[in-house]
Amino acid sequence: MKIDNDLSSTELQMKNYLESIFEGKEFLGAKIEDSLNIFKITEKMFENTIT
């Protein structure tokens, strides 16, 4: 398993979850990287709202 060092623990879990869903299937929507970027942006928005 390749670990991406610039991902937080939550982001890594999200990436693994998305990969497990899309594995072996043709997916016509957003790519895993796109979904992960959307997740990162959303996570930052929540962090900024709380602080």
Image: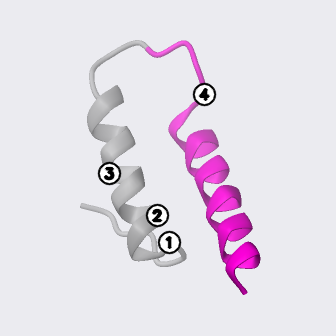
CA gap, disc 4 to disc 2? 16 Å
Q: Are marks 1 and 2 in contact (CB under 8 Å)?
A: yes
- Tell me where residue 30 sits by quadrant: top right
Where 22 falls versus 7 (above or below)? above
Q: Is residue 49 magenta?
A: yes
Pointer 3: residues within 10 angstroms few (<14), some, or many (20+)? few
Pointer 3 residue: 16
Residue 11 disc label: 2
Pointer 1 residue: 7
Could you tell me the amino acid type at mark 1? Leu
SS for callout 4: loop
Q: Give the range drawn in magenta.
A: 27-51
SS for callout 2: helix
Could you tell me the amino acid type at mark 4? Ala
CA gap, disc 4 to disc 3? 15 Å
For the N terminus, the quadrant is: bottom left
Q: Residue at x 29, y 29 (%)?
A: 23
Where 15 falls versus 10 (above or below)? above
Q: Which of marks 4 and 3 is nearer the N terminus?
A: 3
Q: Earlier in the sequence, mark 4 or mark 1?
A: 1
- Tell me where residue 47 sits by quadrant: bottom right
Q: Which of marks 3 and 2 is nearer the N terminus?
A: 2
Place of residue 7 in the rendered image (x, y in percent of width and height, measured from the top left): 50, 71
Could you tell me the amino acid type at mark 2? Glu
Q: Residue at x 51, y 39 (%)?
A: 32
Place of residue 39 in the rendered image (x, y in percent of width and height, measured from the top left): 59, 53
Pointer 4 residue: 30
